[in-house]
């Protein structure tokens, strides 16, 4: 799986505590190998975010993304539950 990053994702990522950045990098590697690995808790979103997906970095932080092609994902945002707004 190849990942593309939005400028908003990069901006929010840089503001995260270093320990969360490191955990996010670990989770992104897992995502690249298997986007539906059970440890990620990947799920499809609904409502105003229909067509989008999310997976967990930890209990608080999530990554909001979409599948662009079969093997390409676009990461939009990283953060707490506010990423769903």
Image (cartoon, grey):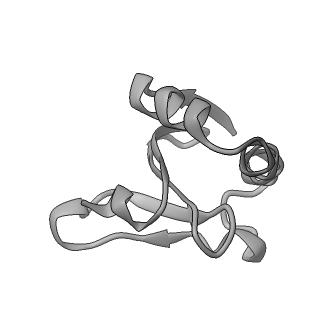
Q: Quadrant of the N terminus?
A: top right
The answer to whether residue 71 is above or below residue 66 is above
Residue 76, image quadrant: top left
Front one among 23 and 44: 23
Say whether residue 6 is left or right of residue 33: left
Q: Residue at x 76, y 54 (%)?
A: 27
Q: Is residue 61 left or right of residue 9?
A: right
Q: Position of residue 54 (x, y in %)?
A: 49, 62
Q: Against 57, is 13 above or below?
A: above
User: Farthest residue in the left direction?
Assistant: 48
On the image, the x and y values in percent for residue 48 come to 16, 64
Which quadrant of the figure has residue 41?
Answer: bottom right
Q: Residue furthest top?
A: 7
Task: Give the residue displayed 44% in from the left and 27% down from the top.
Answer: 6
52 or 62, which is in the foreground?
62
Q: Where, quadrant-wise, is the C terminus in this rendering?
A: bottom left
Question: Residue visible at 55% across and 27% down?
Answer: 4
Q: Eyeballing the image, is 85 above or below 9?
A: below
Front residue (pair 30, 20): 20
Number of marks present in the image shown: 0
């Amino acid at each position: 799986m190849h990942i593309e990053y939005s400028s908003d994702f990069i901006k929010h990522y840089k503001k995260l505590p270093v320990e969360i950045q490191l955990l996010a990098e670990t989770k992104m590697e897992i995502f690249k190998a298997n986007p539906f690995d059970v440890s990620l808790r990947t799920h499809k979103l609904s409502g105003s975010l229909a067509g989008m997906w999310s997976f967990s970095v930890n209990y608080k932080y999530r990554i909001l993304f979409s599948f662009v092609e079969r093997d390409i994902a676009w990461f939009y945002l990283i953060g707490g539950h506010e990423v769903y707004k």
